[in-house]
């Protein structure tokens, strides 16, 4: 069924490894700048993986966050999410009258307050139970981000979190669309935030064989989606937040419209807790096209899930071929994870923003580090250099551990 309301993006906020704010983020993205570096958050001498895509030069106080919140009360995933929300609200030019309309916050995370959990477990071990922070529980909660956003901006509309691994943000955006379409809100703040570059997560992902350990000495070369030499993803952190608004409401207040979200699809692999499948992604892409009332030939660009893992990139390529047939060879496909790393639960928020900015700026960002073609990944991955294209329609793919698949279709806004 086609969506019964037109939903548009009217604000963008980004905290990312390749830039903070949409201008810096976009400038670095289209220039092919990698955000992957040596880990600075902890000593990696004993770790097989020593690289990640950290957010550089982040000062929470620049984003309407108090020093007490930044240093004592909030986990980094909340800080990133609050900062990105502040940027998105500034960008949307929502005034207090609009804020008082029915507005909510549906914001995702894949892991939540892992930094706080590790820090407070150390305090428990070395200092005893009485020294564990009173803010531990409220930092661990996945809904801590949307709760804090709601409190800070006095949002009284639907507010909740979504957690479905690497599909989390895209599921949050879909839930936001559904909430607006059912008249439960006029505006939803949506997207996702993640801050999971910790000793525990690096150990766990490494030991399950998910992270690359091959490029510790050349971090900028480590994330290489669809390349034959890929051997695992690079973990990233940050937040991607968008303002979703019903079209009439946006036009009435003369809002800037980046793009229109016209369709979505969701499915489950029902296959394996970590190993990707093909049928699930195929179904979610087909559902998204059907809801958008578009033919496969209408899609010009896909921001791929493209994690730089051997199975994901191969299976995603096969799924795209099955959905798009001969047209698959004509679609520009890029994985911006080659630059940002994989932001887990925040990936879909960041990558929806990439699609919207690509439509607005008529430019597709590249897949960097594409050096050795893989015969099993033989589509057009926009290798190494951005490409100017007058985009009318784009797709964003998000696939997560647990077999969760979520897909969005965006179009250039036209009256």
Image (cartoon, helix red, strand yellow):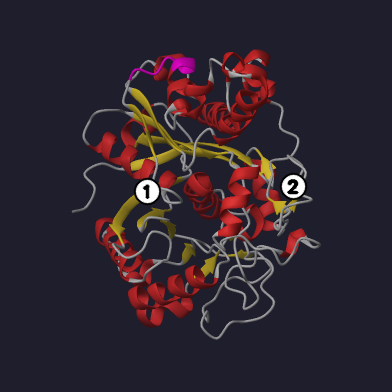
307 relative position to 401: left or right? right
**Alpha carbon distance from label 1 to label 2:** 36 Å
Quadrant position of the N terminus in the picture: bottom left
> Can you identify the residue that label 1 sits on?
261
The residue nearer to you, when weighing 386 against 36, is: 36
Determine if the magenta segment contains residue 184: no
What stretch of residues is rendered in magenta? 151-156
* Image position, residue 290 (x, y; %): 25, 61
| Comparing labels 1 and 2, the label whose residue is closer to the camera | 2
Q: Is residue 80 visible?
A: no
248 relative position to 202: left or right? left
Q: Helix, strand or loop at disc 1? A: strand
Determine if the magenta segment contains residue 153: yes
Seen at 40% across and 41% down, the residue is 163
* Image position, residue 393 (x, y; %): 42, 60
> Can you identify the residue that label 2 sits on?
39
The residue nearer to you, when weighing 117 against 411, is: 117
Give the farthest residue toward the bottom: 375
């Amino acid at each position: 069924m086609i969506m019964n309301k037109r939903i548009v993006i009217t604000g963008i906020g980004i905290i990312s490894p390749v830039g903070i704010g949409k201008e810096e983020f976009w400038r670095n993205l289209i220039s092919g700048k990698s955000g992957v570096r040596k880990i600075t958050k902890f000593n990696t001498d004993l770790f097989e993986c020593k690289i990640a895509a950290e957010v550089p030069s982040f000062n929470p106080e620049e984003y309407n966050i108090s020093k007490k919140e930044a240093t004592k009360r909030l986990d980094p995933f909340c800080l990133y999410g609050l900062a990105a929300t502040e940027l998105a609200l500034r960008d949307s030019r929502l005034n207090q009258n609009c804020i008082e309309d029915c507005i909510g916050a549906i914001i995702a995370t894949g892991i939540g307050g892992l930094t706080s959990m590790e820090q407070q477990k150390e305090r428990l071990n070395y200092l005893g139970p009485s020294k564990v922070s009173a803010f531990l529980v409220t930092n661990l909660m996945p809904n801590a981000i949307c709760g804090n956003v709601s409190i800070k901006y006095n949002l009284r509309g639907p507010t909740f979190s979504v957690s479905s691994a690497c599909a989390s943000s895209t599921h949050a955006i879909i839930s936001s669309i559904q909430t607006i379409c059912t008249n439960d809100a006029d505006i939803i703040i949506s997207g996702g935030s993640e801050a999971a570059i910790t000793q525990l997560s690096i150990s766990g992902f490494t030991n399950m064989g998910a992270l690359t350990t091959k490029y510790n000495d050349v971090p900028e070369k480590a994330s290489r989606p669809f390349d034959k030499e890929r051997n695992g993803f690079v973990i990233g952190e940050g937040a991607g937040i968008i303002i979703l608004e019903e079209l009439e409401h946006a036009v009435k207040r003369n809002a800037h419209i980046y793009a229109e979200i016209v369709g979505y699809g969701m499915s489950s692999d029902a296959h394996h807790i970590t190993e990707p499948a093909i049928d699930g992604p195929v179904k979610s892409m087909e559902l998204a096209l059907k809801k958008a009332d578009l033919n496969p030939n209408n899609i010009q660009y896909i921001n791929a899930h493209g994690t730089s893992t051997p199975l994901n990139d191969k299976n995603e390529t096969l799924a795209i071929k099955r959905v798009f047939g001969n047209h698959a060879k004509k679609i520009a496909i890029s994985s911006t994870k080659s630059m940002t790393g994989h932001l887990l639960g925040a990936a879909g928020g960041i990558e929806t923003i990439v699609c919207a900015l690509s439509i607005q700026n008529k430019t597709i960002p590249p897949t960097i580090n594409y050096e050795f073609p893989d015969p099993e990944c033989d589509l057009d991955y926009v290798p190494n250099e951005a490409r100017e294209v007058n985009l009318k329609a784009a797709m964003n793919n998000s696939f997560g551990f647990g077999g969760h698949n979520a897909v969005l279709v965006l179009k250039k806004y036209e009256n």
